Image (cartoon, grey):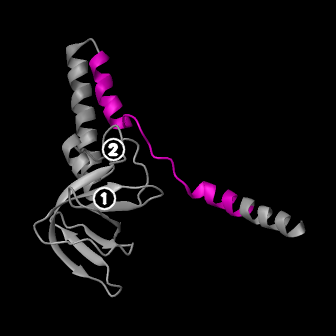
Amino acid sequence: MRNWTLLLAAIALVSAGAAPAARKVQTGTPAQVQRLMGCRTIAAAEQRLACYDREASAMQQAIANQDLFMVDKEKARAAGRSLFGFSIPNFGGLFGNNDEISQIDGVIKSAGRNSDGGWVITLQDGSVWTQTDDWPGFDARPGAKVNVRRGVLGSFWLSIPGKNGIKVKRIG
């Protein structure tokens, strides 16, 4: 009984120490953008123009100092697709309404075997996947279209449409 108590106490201490390390991602409209949009409420034309000039200049300086980043939706989605398969934090909607992409389609650029006899597959988008199961019936050939989809418990499956797939892990 004493061992269980010590084990639970140790788990509680480790959990408490890990909690402050997790940072909350800032969501919502950045302060610089809010101030610029606030200029719209000024009725007098000259004051409104002066406000826009001042806040646009401040925003331009924040971008130059890399305190503020502007990314269009398509570039954000492309970045999300390029990170598919890696363990990354939630980015507060940066990659669209749902940060979690469930699958990607690609084309095999190259395929070879690792020292364990499993496949190492490079897709044309540059992502590199290695086989983590021992399914022998998979045949990866350059030029083949593939689908990589999210499985359960952080796993991924790579398959050629209409054929059995293999369990994979992204390594590059």
Q: What residue type is disc 2 on?
A: Leu
Q: What residue is rendered at 17% in x and 63% in y?
A: 125
Q: Position of residue 120 (x, y in %)?
A: 27, 76
Q: Which residue is mark 1?
A: 83
Q: Earlier in the sequence, mark 2 or mark 1?
A: 1
Spatial CA span between label 2 and label 1: 13 Å
Q: Position of residue 18 (x, y in %)?
A: 62, 60
Q: Position of residue 54 (x, y in %)?
A: 26, 33
The picture quadrant where one finds residue 149 is bottom left
> Would you place residue 98 above or below residue 147 in this image?
above
The picture quadrant where one finds residue 14 is bottom right
Of the pair 66 and 1, the residue shown nearer to us: 1
Mark 1 secondary-structure assignment? loop
Residue that lies at the very extreme toward the left in this rendered image: 143
Residue that lies at the very extreme toward the top in this rendered image: 43
Q: What residue is rendered at 78% in x and 62% in y?
A: 8
Magenta-drawn stretch contains 94: no
Label 1 environment density (alpha carbons within 10 Å; few <14, some 14–19, many ≥20): some
Q: Which residue is mark 2?
A: 94
What is the span of residues highlighted in magenta in the rendered image? Answer: 13-41
Q: What residue is rendered at 41% in x and 43% in y?
A: 92
